Amino acid sequence: MKIRLVEYDPTVITQSMLDDYQLNEDEPISKPKSLIKRSQSNSNMTPIMILDDKRLVGSFCLHTNDGPLAYGGNFGTDILVRAFSIDSRFRRKDFALVALLQLPEFIYFHYKEIERIIIAVNHNNLPAQALYVKAGFVDTQRRAVGKLGELFIYQKDI
């Protein structure tokens, strides 16, 4: 396993890699192509790809400034992780955990002013909640309302 986090770059992440990304039909999460498109109209959003060697195994978006505000975060010092997903073919292989454990160092080197990572998770997504705790995130006890209902807000200091 050679997991690394990289900002989206079309010279590294090919169109075929994006087209091949698989999520289960019932999952209400964005695929990498959607994250990339959304980030093109919002300069505060940066799509991040999770690579295992040269395979695209996951993705998420880092949202600065206004992103964390809706979840009780601070403008300028917090960063929000949006749409964290692992390609359905690569789940239960620790790719998500390794990526989340690498995230503080990645943010430290790319976003010098950031002090805290925030992530929101649906109240009924127990596997994700357990994953975030295992990766060192803590439940803030803050709650928000999302498209699918109540969201639990987790955070981790850098």
Image (cartoon, rainbow, N blue to C red):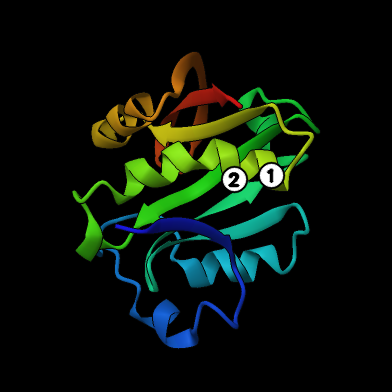
Percent coordinates x, y for residue 78 in the rendering: 70, 31
Quarter of the image for residue 124 reads: top left
Q: Amino acid at mark 2?
A: Phe
Q: Residue furthest top?
A: 141
For this view, does 116 lie left or right of residue 87?
right
For this view, does 6 lie left or right of residue 44?
left
Q: Residue at x 62, y 74 (%)?
A: 9
Q: Are marks 2 and 1 in contact (CB under 8 Å)?
A: yes
Q: Name the residue that disc number 1 marks.
A: 109
Percent coordinates x, y for residue 121 in the rendering: 42, 34
Q: Name the residue that disc number 2 marks.
A: 106
Q: Is residue 81 above or below residue 11?
A: above
Q: Residue furthest bottom?
A: 16
Q: Which quadrant is home to the C terminus? A: top right
What secondary structure is marked by label 1?
helix
Q: Nearer the viewer, residue 154 or 14?
A: 14
For this view, does 56 lie left or right of residue 47?
left
Q: Amino acid at mark 1?
A: Phe
Percent coordinates x, y for residue 115 in the rendering: 69, 26
Q: Residue at x 44, y 49 (%)?
A: 84
Quarter of the image for residue 12 reads: bottom right
Q: Nearer the viewer, residue 7 or 127?
A: 7
